[in-house]
Image (cartoon, helix red, strand yellow):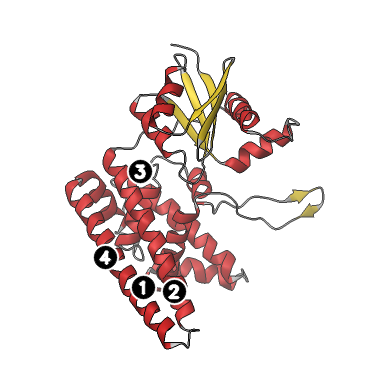
Amino acid sequence: MSEKIYFGVDVCKESLAFCGAGVAGQVANNAPGVRRLLARLPKGAHLIIEASGGYERELVRVAQQSAVQLSVVNPRQVRDFARGVGRLAKTDPIDAEMLARFGAEVNPPPDAVPTAAEVVLQELVSARQQLVEERTVLLQQKAQHLNSIVRRLDCARLKLLQRQIAQLELAIGSILEEQSALKQKVERLQQVKGVGLITAVTCVALCPELGSLSRGQTAALVGVAPYNDDSGARKGWRHIAGGRPKLRRALYMAAISAIRSNPVLRRFYQQLRQRNKPPKIALVAVIRKLAILLNQLLRNPSFLPAS
């Protein structure tokens, strides 16, 4: 078995800076550039890439198709690591070097390779979320507009957004009909009262790891794991951080529904409130419990959710 060699790749809109195993350079961030980069990798290379708002997608796609292991990591973690080792300067080559060192020290697990259907579903779900957010903002602005022309334009934009959301939902439904494995996961998650079709699809699309995680990993991935803030005799407030915000937003809405319609989660929420837990803290606890429950449902086919 070949030794794993970590390569850091700093992703920009126009370029990819890379560093590892004594090799460093820069290529264009496009399909030919990605191919040139992969051609320079030694056997056993493991790419460490920062999440860069989508600019890393071509690299991730081609690398996974070429059976090259990679990990897409949180930029904040890498920046904190760089500060921790005293590298305060920030350039593309330095960032690539820090990514390689981060990989060697932290040893992040390689990302799972999604199927073609999972990639399409994730893009459809993300696009739908963006349109829903736009619709929400427009509805809030529309209430403040008095000019008849502006209000008429608002109505036209709302109708367009609604049509586009409906088109995406039809496309999502078509993917589920074609992919029985994804459809079964979605239907399994909907067995929990409060979890509707859109929430279930969002969980399957944005969290393909669901069903293979521990309780702590599930909470951390969603971003609802409570972190201690203690020092000596001081006991600070525990707080949540990190995770996947789009996934957390979907589970937030599901938790709101669950504390009304799900007897188990409603009772859990009420018990926390009776113990004088603030509403927001109690709701975060419900999100955490809900996420762990969904993971358990996919992890154990014989598990039945309490009703």
Residue at the location (50% across, 13% down)?
3
Closer to the camera: disc 1 or disc 3? 1
Give the distance between the C-alpha atoms of the residues marked 4 and 3, in whole angstroms: 32 Å
**Residue with the mark numbered 3:** 299
Q: Secondary structure at mark 2?
A: helix
Rendering coords of residue 228 (x, y %):
68, 50
Disc tally is 4
**Residue with the mark numbered 4:** 166
Closer to the camera: disc 4 or disc 3? 4
Query: Hey, which residue is sitting farthest left in the picture?
Result: 178
Residue type at tag 4: Ala
Give the distance between the C-alpha atoms of the residues marked 2 and 1, in whole angstroms: 8 Å
Residue type at tag 2: Leu
Residue at the location (39% across, 60% down)?
129
Give the answer, above or below, for where 23 lies relative to 93. above
Query: Hey, which residue is sitting farthest right in the picture?
Result: 233
